[in-house]
Image (spheres, rainbow, N blue to C red):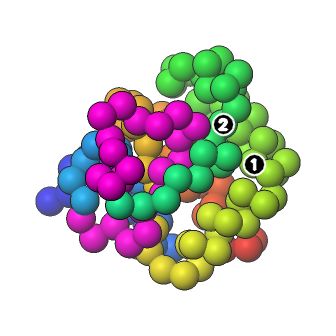
Amino acid sequence: MLPLHVILVLAMGIAVKRVYDPIGDDGTRILVDRLWPRGVSKEALQGIWVKEIAPSTELRKWFDHQPQKWPEFKRKYFAELDGRPESVDRVVRLVRSGKVTLLYASKNEEFNHAVALREYLQNDART
């Protein structure tokens, strides 16, 4: 059985999991954090880093993984993503090419930007 925080969306082939979790059948691994995760080497990542897809520093600090801010965080983050078509297109191309895993470092498995990004990609007409 998969750990609770490993969320798979089989129809689109997008998974979301912590960068510290063991590598499995992840497909293309995409680190979507703005900051490099502590204790993870570039070799251990076995993937690519698309830091420009992460929320702005200001939005990340405002949100602070507070569940009551989740709806507003997603609205603001989606607006930021709408303003970054090149970054979104880069990830969309990877999603179209096969299974991907969006990696994040946060301890909060339910309320984090990688989960929001997956939702955004699911609702994007390009995917």
Q: Quadrant of the C terminus?
A: bottom right
Disc 1 packing (10 Å; few <14; some 14–19; many ≥20): many
Residue under pointer 2: 55
Outermost residue on the left side: it is 1
> Does residue 2 belong to the magenta stretch?
no
Give how far apart the Cα atoms at labels 1 and 2 are.
8 Å
Which residue is more in the foreground, 86 or 102? 86
Q: Is residue 49 above or below residue 25?
A: above
- Look at 60% across and 45% down and name the residue there: 51
Residue under pointer 1: 81
Position of 97 with respect to 22 (left or right) is right
- Look at 36% across and 31% down and name the residue there: 38
As shown in the figure, which amino acid type bears the numbered disc 2? Pro
User: Could you tell me if residue 17 is visible in this image?
Assistant: no
Q: Is residue 87 above or below residue 90?
A: above
Q: Position of residue 4 (x, y in %)?
A: 26, 47
